[in-house]
Amino acid sequence: MIPGIGTLTQDTLWCFSQVKGTIEIGTTEADIISTVEFNHTGELLATGDKGGRVVIFQREQESKNQVHRRGEYNVYSTFQSHEPEFDYLKSLEIEEKINKIRWLPQQNAAYFLLSTNDKTVKLWKVSERDKRPEGYNLKDEEGRLRDPATITTLRVPVLRPMDLMVEATPRRVFANAHTYHINSISVNSDYETYMSADDLRINLWNFEITNQSFNIVDIKPANMEELTEVITAAEFHPHHCNTFVYSSSKGTIRLCDMRASALCDRHTKFFEEPEDPSNRSFFSEIISSISDVKFSHSGRYIMTRDYLTVKVWDLNMENRPIETYQVHDYLRSKLCSLYENDCIFDKFECVWNGSDSVIMTGSYNNFFRMFDRNTKRDVTLEASRENSKPRAILKPRKVCVGGKRRKDEISVDSLDFSKKILHTAWHPSENIIAVAATNNLYIFQDKVN
Amino acid sequence: MSAEVPEAASAEEQKSEHSMHPWSFQLSIPNNLEEMEDKVTSPEKAEEAKLKARYPHLGQKPGGSDFLRKRLQKGQKYFDSGDYNMAKAKMKNKQLPAAAPDKTEVTGDHIPTPQDLPQRKPSLVASKLAG
């Protein structure tokens, strides 16, 4: 496994670093982590959960004394981002679950992030306060107002240091723009706009304006009976502020250019892999549904995740992906039961490492997979409390498909389908990964020699 | 379905050379056996057959309108807001009040508005990740 940066000759060994969350039998639903995201420097790591809460971890400064121990992530701030609501018109509950968090690039001392549930996007400002004004004239030390008649002298308030306090405040609320459920948000490279995508529409917002948004994609048919596909994910190009892509439930990706027209219903590029009609089955369309689409950092490639594979596409070639990686092909013979227990609809995400040389995605049984695009080697690792001794090296795992099972292998039938890793994140420049395993967050780092 | 498998096996036995891998059967199959073989050889098609056996009325268009529309309307639908609030209250207190009516209940004097109805309190418990 070639590391994301540097040496081409050594394999990367991944080690356990930290785990956040409790060990519980019977997880509280609210604690299930629903999104994980590093900020642009990797200094901060944010998680969102089903209970609408956001927890931000900050990497501690590396001390000179402990050169061999990379900075650990500790809690920096936590707040309730979204609360459950009730749509009175449709008598539908609106979940508070955080679907996505996206960081804005840092422009001043404060940090900004977007968090969204099914219906509402919010811009949160996270800032530090380490000084407090003291010596007011009109207020006493407890903040109670003083009777102006009793004041005989004036003093100048001074700023005194105080214990660091991290405050999160909602700066903007972008509401009432989505009839369907928001699945994606993406900050534009112009840092002025962002998009939010639901099942049928994509809207473009300006960060400063909350009461208006532009609709840039609308695939809702005039007659809903004719509905054949929905939007599953969308993302802006990392450098070209006019370009974005969106994926569909039919396994296709469309690239749109906002310069072409105000409404980008006509795509500029259409990515689809031809399917062998003789291979078609009832499950074909369901397993081809793309659950995540991500631009490479270079902006040259896109990666898509469908139920069984991860694919890398070159933006310059629309007729097929340039690389296809099997995540867990052994599930092909389990599709019937996976359909019955709804697992076939699980939405796995995928991520690039900082140099776009390695891609990662999750699987079941708390397994996650990494694929090295250069060496074509892959590895399966597990996020489990059993491997959670500090700096313990993770042992590659293997699923045995049939026949004789070797000692360390696990058979397909023994896989725990309730332990699914849907959300992972990779530090923008280092080999540090965050893996969400239901209600626990694991942080792994590569071995420092 | 189950009758097809032994038939295919016996057809395969007649072939002179074939590897042990079940999927390689497809390479040298005479046309009239092809369709039958497909069901046996492709694991996906085998799974599909299993599903159809269990749910014979499953729609012909798998990714079609019904399925997608169910996806669009995610989330539990309640009869009305009262139903919703009742459900939330039940979740919070497993025990229903025995006799004495809740003093904060809005009854009688005026028609309750959404603001008056007891709101489901959001989880004030901090995330366990922050513990």
Image (cartoon, rainbow, N blue to C red):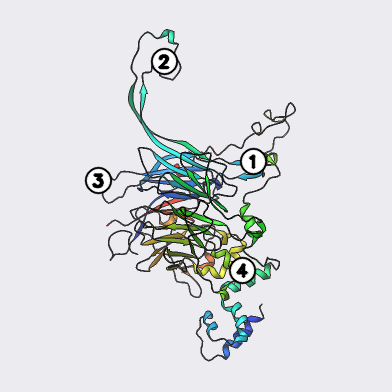
What is the chain letter for disc 1? B
Compared to A282, does A105 lie above or below?
A: above
Is label 1 in a helix, a strand or a loop? helix
What's the CA distance linking mark 1 and mark 4? 38 Å
Numbered circle sitting on residue A138: 2
Number of other residues with Cα within 10 Å of mark 2, as a class: few under 14, some 14 to 19, many 20 or more: some
Residue labelled with disc 3? A65
Left or right of residue A82, residue A242 in this image:
left
What's the CA distance linking mark 2 and mark 3? 48 Å
Q: As shown in the figure, which amino acid type bears the numbered disc 3? A: Asn
Q: Earlier in the sequence, mark 4 or mark 3?
A: 3
Q: As shown in the figure, which amino acid type bears the numbered disc 1? A: Lys
What's the CA distance linking mark 2 and mark 1? 45 Å
Number of other residues with Cα within 10 Å of mark 1, as a class: few under 14, some 14 to 19, many 20 or more: some
Q: Which is closer to the viewer, label 2 or label 3?
A: 2
Q: Position of residue A101 (x, y in %)?
A: 46, 47
What's the CA distance linking mark 4 and mark 2? 74 Å
What is the chain letter for disc 2? A
Is label 4 in a helix, a strand or a loop? loop
Q: Residue at x 57, y 76 (%)?
A: A278
